[in-house]
Amino acid sequence: MGRRERRSPEPDPALPGGPDWITLPAAASRMCRPSVAGHVPRGTSQEPIRRMGRARSRGPETFSPAAAPASDPASIPQPLGIPRDHTMDPLSIAPDGYRDLRDHLAWGDAGRRRIVLVAGEDAVRFVDGFCTASLAALAPGAGTEAFFPDARGQVQLWATILRMADGVWIDADPPLDGDGEGWSLATHLDRYHIRERLEIVDASDRFATLFLAGPAARAWLQREASLPVGSGEDLPGRGASPRTLIAPQHGRLADVAAGVLPGHCAGIPAAILQGEWLGPGSYLVVVPRDDASRLVDQWRGEGIVEASAAALEAVRREEGRPAPCDVPPRVLPQEFGRDGAAISFTKGCYLGQETVARLDALGHVNRRFVGIVTAAAVSAGPGATVTIRGAQEAVGTITSAGPSPRLGEGLGLGLMRTQALAAGVELEVAGVSARWVELPLSRGTSGDVA
């Protein structure tokens, strides 16, 4: 089945033309997540990790993507306070699918995401003792971001946690090595599981995960996916929590652990998670691995554009979402600046809480996770050192990087010393002028342009 025809936008007189983007070397443009070309591959499911306590057993209307209005590419908002570099048209460096993710509708391969299910009477209380967020107040279907620190308070994993009627669903990015296990959350939790009435299941190999994002994604799901009970045939809107288990909102983890997804997407068994993986209102569609190709074929048949791995990465960086490659050893939760979304300072004890509380009492962090924008199209890739102009001392390191279609410049992510973020401090990356920006880019705060 062919894709829908892609039409080039009309020239924007406000965006002067300029030299082509200088291609970053492979080391600089590598993806933080494994990329899968074409479609989601089928794989052989492996037995999940199971540790049993005394867990209780329990027993359309056609939608055309062309019908949704697409924004004029020139209307893509620019971060306030960040001067545009008029040496290039930002949209000229947009990878395949970027415009659709931002202005319309696109799908993309989400990789082999880590899916850990903890079900049972004690599941919520147990997981609450190992993460920074408060899970007790979450209603079934609601979710939160959370960090999983070690005993020293250092981040081991950043994840989305969604509560279900009989436990919690934990979703996290694929590990750095793609097919390997990396740091295993299931093993970590099982190490502390003694007599609690719960079951821990690593279901990562049982399901395929696909992103569906863009302004038209919500409308497509309203027509083609199962909806939560009592939703009034609607999906959560702007006032709802950005992290929600759409379908099945009231399903049981025991069924999911057995490979049964009671929701559906386009007639295919599915669970649909709403989150902020690719900005507000993006969705993660979880389907049995053997059914993924059917859903992909249907999307392609409807003309829904496939976003390339480069487009997914560009949006992730612009949204300021740290990938595993952006979480170096010995980093603390508050350094990522996600306190309001991922950290509760009033909940009970949890592993690593002493360090988090001590840092909160100090009232400041020594490093911050920010964006680093190069003032020209240069090869400032992962591992590049950020310095203060005229000084040799490193004040930060870029952990992931690539072109930003929104800025028309290079955008890297990394941890920076807070003193280097003061007004008037001039930064360099590999001898080239740079500046720092708040994340996501829509916040619109930046450091001085060097």
Image (tube, rainbow, N blue to C red):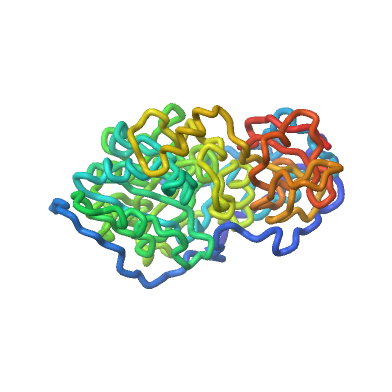
- Residue 307, picture quadrant: bottom right
Tell me residue 313's x, y (percent): 61, 52
- The number of discs equals 0
Depth check, front residue: 347 or 382:
347
Depth check, front residue: 95 or 45:
45
Residue drawn at x 30%, y 49% as measured from the top left: 263
Depth check, front residue: 252 or 133:
133
Residue drawn at x 34%, y 70% as measured from the top left: 46
In the picture, measured across the screen, residue 96 lies left or right of residue 260, that is right
Residue drawn at x 56%, y 50% as measured from the top left: 327
Tell me residue 390's x, y (percent): 86, 43
Residue drawn at x 56%, y 40% as measured from the top left: 336
Reply above or below: 440 against 1: above
In the picture, measured across the screen, residue 326 lies left or right of residue 424, that is left
In the picture, measured across the screen, residue 305 lies left or right of residue 95, that is left
Can residue 100 be seen in this snapshot? no
Can residue 197 be seen in this snapshot? yes
Tell me residue 275's x, y (percent): 45, 41
Reply above or below: 152 against 340: below
